[in-house]
Amino acid sequence: AQKVTQAQTEISVVEKEDVTLDCVYETRDTTYYLFWYKQPPSGELVFLIRRNSFDEQNEISGRYSWNFQKSTSSFNFTITASQVVDSAVYFCALPSGGGNTPLVFGKGTRLSVIA
Amino acid sequence: DADVTQTPRNRITKTGKRIMLECSQTKGHDRMYWYRQDPGLGLRLIYYSFDVKDINKGEISDGYSVSRQAQAKFSLSLESAIPNQTALYFCATSDNRVSGANVLTFGAGSRLTVL
């Protein structure tokens, strides 16, 4: 079955430090999408990124970058020069049954950025 | 107004009561979902619907039912609430097109407490 593991339950960093959130997945599919979502303290869930498995190039968006490695089944998320506003719970996800089936989420990593 | 609106935002009820959580959206999306969030467990899928005539069970559908009244409305019912259904419930929507599938737009959440 499709599975997402986020081994880091909580991470705490000091502002301006770099931090990497790990995501390891299991899938039967040869092509698939992977996702990251953010849940800030206010509680709403926000889509961050979707990557297709055939594109292993790193993705960078401002201070955010994503490293996708099929060889290790990982899709890690790095925040460079973290800020207090990055404090949130971050979820990694992939389709539960492949294709466009609904997402199965990891248990999330709570990131606290301390000023 | 929010793209995805959930009502009520907070509800306290007693064991055995029937509860309905409502979700409406202005995104024009065909797909709608109900997820449940518990501390340390991430998000788990309860039910989903890919169009008005389509209803599918998710990972944890026992004790819940849903109704897709229109493209824009998807309600979740607890026929006889029990304390372990105390959780934060999220409604989400997504496009049917491959480019938008699983790029979820979430509601603000409905916090349900069953005493």
Image: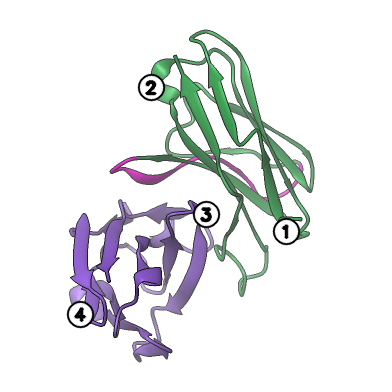
Residue A105 lies, with reference to residue A25, above or below; the image says above
Give the green chain's letter. Answer: B
The C terminus of chain B lies in which quarter of the figure?
A: top left
Task: Please provide the residue range marked out in magenta.
Answer: B39-52
Q: Name the amino acid, label 2.
A: Asn
Viewer-nearest of discs 3 and 2: 3
Asked if labels 1 and 4 share a chain, the reply is no
Q: What element carries label 2?
A: helix
Residue appearing at x 21%, y 81% in the figure = A17
* Badges 3 and 2, same chain: no
In the displayed structure image, the side of residue A32 where residue B90 appears, left or right: right
Question: x, y (%) of residue B35?
Answer: 50, 43
Spot occupied by residue B13 in the image (x, y as percentages of width and height) = 54, 16
**Is residue A56 depicted above or below B8 in this figure?**
below
Judging by the rendered image, the residue that carries numbered circle 2 is: B84
| SS class, disc 1 | loop
Give the tally of numbered discs: 4
Crowding around mark 4 (Cα neighbors within 10 Å: few <14, some 14 to 19, many 20+) is few
Q: How far apart are marks 1 and 3 (CA)?
A: 19 Å
Decide which of tag 4 and tag 3 comes sooner along the chain: 3
Is residue B44 inside the magenta stretch? Answer: yes
Residue at the disc numbered 1: B29
Q: Residue A44 got which mark?
A: 3
The amino acid type found where label 1 is placed reads His
Is circle 4 on the same chain as circle 2?
A: no
Judge left or right: residue B79 versus residue B23: left
- The reply to the same-chain question for discs 4 and 3 is yes
Residue beneath label 4, please?
A71
Q: Are the residues flagged by discs 1 and 4 in contact, CB closer than 8 Å?
A: no
- Residue closer to the observer: A75 or A30: A75
